[in-house]
């Protein structure tokens, strides 16, 4: 039972959808039809779909026969149910509709928001429950469907569509066909349209991006094929055919989104030195944890993200070495500890209660980093050999299925714990999954590279000039560690000393820059103001925006500055970022 969907798949279940949609960049509308094939488990029951803001003009069966349909009351989080009375024997129904220009899943970018500056761009973001704002479906991760799509664009615009599908074909100028023949949850159906170019980096992997970005992107992501091969050697075959990556314009609200066959990623990972590519390892890992085995409901989200963070760190370790993996793990754990300090106890549980709430509320570091820590603890206890074999069997046994936390725990019990009772006694699974905080048996992680950073920071706080510190060999994670624990005594003058020595304000590394700007706001270092303004006006990634706006409203006179920037920037942000920032800045 998924509390975030109006659908009743136990009565009538959607099995596939065929889309035929035209993108209108003038009106900001997708319009056309969705044809759904259904399995009628209860022949008397109507079909119930999720919709939110869709403008429906007709519902027909067998091409022409109009059938009875109605839209129910809208819930602020869930949207409104569309109930369709199916005639006897009908198994296919077509909904003709258009999306609203304000559909949350769809972001329409002006040419000015793209790299090329002359063509518009569109992308969709389905997770968690936004697909219903562009496709009428049973929008629950527990419902898996195959799909195909015909996408039509105005040839005069010079844009092309791409989708999260395993087949793509140009039918004629402006008309493209896609199909995904593996059953996926609706939140993984994704579309992007823009001035896109493509660079092969291996037989099964290409990078898509705007022409001015694609070369740089392909160079940055050159390790992607190695990542796929590494993950396969750990957890079994990659089952989706191609693995392509689409680099979006900077307005994209997330770091990455694991749309099958085509990961969507922010351009802010293009640092020039491959230092931020763990994000690709993460989205790729979802091809096992998340897309192959999917959380059945959003309260089981940790099954997607906790496993994926764990896999991501294993890939990073195999390719970039254990020290880099440890540093990235520690940064995640520090973030988790920070968030836990101000989080209600109930939200600290992996198996979170989301009744009456938006699934977005569960998108904290808990499912990610506490989830991964739980798996790391199991690995420590049972040993790598046994735990890796367990995970491989787990993915295989649940391939192309959606499962609940209970189902995972049952599998864990019979397939791992029961075989070694002496070891099983040493872990309190209930405390990890249904308890708050971080259990005391969370494995200790130490990083020599971070100790170097801590020593340098202490030296500098003790009076040494920033320029005298030996930072020559430092990597990105070390710089992040350096900036993350700056004592309150570091004022604007000390910030200037750092900036003169290390040029943080001009950093081309988005993670370092975002952290630096946050610190600059908090410590009153105004020399970074212009850069902050420029960053907030171009980057839409919520993970960066949230702490920056929070920092702004937290300092004297900052709320006015935040309001001023937000008023200009808000129209450029995606709905999910706006939702978060409206609460922080106020509208
Ligand atoms: N699937 C998530 C993004 C997401 C989660 C979108 C929930 C909407 C609702 C994606 O895999 C993810 O976790 N992205 C992270 C990066 C990752 C390296 C932690 C992000 O975007 O920051
Ligand atoms: Zn993820």
Image (cartoon, grey):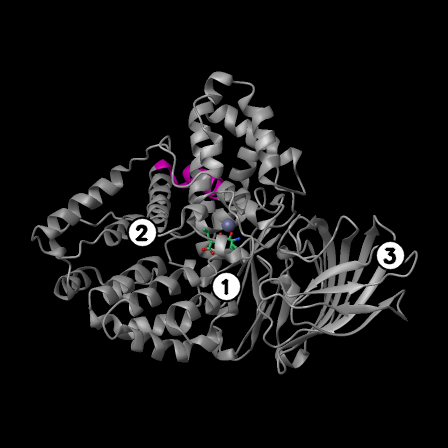
Q: Which residue is mark 3?
A: 91
- Give above or below for 447 relative to 59: above
Residue 514 sits inside the magenta stretch: no
The vertical placement of 210 against 240, above or below, is: below
How far across and how far down the image is residue 284, in percent?
54, 47
The answer to whether the beta carbon of the residue marked 2 is less than 8 Å from any atom of ligand 1 is no
Measure how far apart labels 2 and 3 are at the Cα level. Answer: 55 Å
Left or right: 504 as drawn, with respect to 493? right
Q: Residues within 10 Å of mark 3 (few under 14, many from 20)?
A: some
Q: Which of the two labelled residues, at mark 2 and mark 1, occupies the earlier sequence position?
A: 1
- Residue picked out by circle 1: 214
Q: Which residue is mark 2?
A: 476
Q: Residue at x 25, y 67 (%)?
A: 521
Closer-to-camera residue (13/121): 13
Circle 2 Cα neighbour tier, 10 Å, few/some/many (<14 / 14–19 / ≥20) = some
Identify whether 469 is placed above or below 74: above
Q: Earlier in the sequence, mark 1 or mark 3?
A: 3
């Amino acid at each position: 039972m998924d509390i975030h969907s109006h659908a009743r798949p136990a009565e009538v279940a959607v099995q596939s959808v065929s889309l035929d949609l035209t993108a209108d960049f003038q009106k900001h509308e997708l319009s056309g039809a969705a044809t759904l094939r259904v399995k009628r488990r209860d022949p008397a029951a109507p079909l119930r779909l999720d919709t939110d803001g869709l403008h429906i003009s007709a519902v027909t069966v067998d091409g022409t026969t109009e059938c009875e349909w109605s839209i129910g009351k809208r819930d602020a989080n869930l949207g409104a149910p569309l109930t369709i009375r199916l005639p006897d024997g009908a198994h296919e129904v077509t909904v003709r509709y258009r999306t609203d220009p304000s559909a949350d899943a769809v972001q329409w970018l002006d040419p000015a928001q793209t790299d090329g500056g002359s063509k518009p761009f569109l992308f969709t973001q389905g997770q968690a429950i936004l697909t219903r704002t562009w496709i009428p479906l049973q929008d629950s991760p527990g419902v898996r469907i195959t799909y195909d799509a015909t996408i039509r664009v105005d040839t005069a615009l010079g844009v092309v569509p791409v989708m999260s599908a395993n087949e793509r074909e140009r039918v004629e100028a402006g008309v493209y066909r896609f199909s995904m023949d593996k059953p996926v949850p609706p939140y993984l159906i994704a579309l992007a349209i823009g001035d896109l170019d493509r660079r092969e980096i291996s037989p099964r992997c290409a990078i898509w991006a705007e022409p001015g970005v694609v070369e740089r992107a392909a160079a940055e992501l050159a390790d992607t094929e190695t990542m796929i091969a590494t993950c396969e050697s750990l957890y079994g075959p990659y089952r989706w055919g191609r693995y392509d990556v689409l680099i979006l314009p900077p307005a994209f609200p997330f770091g990455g989104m694991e749309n099958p066959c085509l990961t969507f990623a922010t351009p802010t990972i293009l640092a020039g030195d491959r230092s931020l590519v763990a994000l690709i390892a993460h989205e790729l890992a979802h091809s096992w944890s998340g897309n192959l085995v999917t959380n059945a409901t959003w309260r089981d989200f940790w099954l997607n993200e906790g496993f994926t963070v764990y896999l991501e760190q294993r890939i990073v370790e195999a390719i970039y070495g254990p020290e880099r993996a440890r540093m990235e793990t520690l940064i995640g754990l520090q973030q988790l500890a920070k968030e836990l300090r101000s989080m209600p106890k109930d939200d600290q549980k992996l198996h979170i209660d989301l009744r009456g709430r938006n699934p977005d509320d569960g998108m904290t570091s808990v499912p990610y980093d506490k989830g991964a820590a739980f798996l790391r603890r199991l690995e420590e206890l049972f040993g790598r050999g046994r735990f890796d074999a367990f995970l491989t069997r787990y993915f295989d046994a649940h391939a192309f299925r959606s499962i609940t936390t209970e189902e995972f725990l049952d599998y864990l019990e019979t397939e791992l714990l029961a075989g070694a009772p002496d070891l099983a006694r040493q872990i309190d699974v209930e405390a990890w999954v249904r308890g708050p905080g971080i259990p005391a048996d969370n494995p200790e992680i130490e990083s020599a590279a971070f100790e170097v950073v801590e020593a340098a920071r202490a030296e500098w706080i003790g009076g040494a000039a920033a320029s005298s510190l030996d930072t020559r060999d430092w990597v990105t994670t070390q710089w992040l560690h350096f900036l993350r624990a700056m004592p309150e005594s570091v004022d604007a003058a000390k910030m200037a000393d750092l900036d003169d020595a290390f040029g943080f304000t001009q950093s081309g590394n988005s993670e370092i820059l975002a952290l630096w700007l946050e610190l600059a706001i908090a410590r009153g270092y105004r020399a970074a103001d212009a850069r902050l303004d420029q960053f907030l006006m171009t980057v839409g990634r919520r993970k960066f925006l949230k702490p920056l706006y929070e920092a702004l409203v937290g300092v004297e006179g900052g709320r006015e500055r935040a309001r001023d920037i937000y008023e200009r920037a808000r129209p450029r942000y995606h709905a999910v970022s706006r939702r978060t920032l409206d609460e922080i800045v106020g509208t």
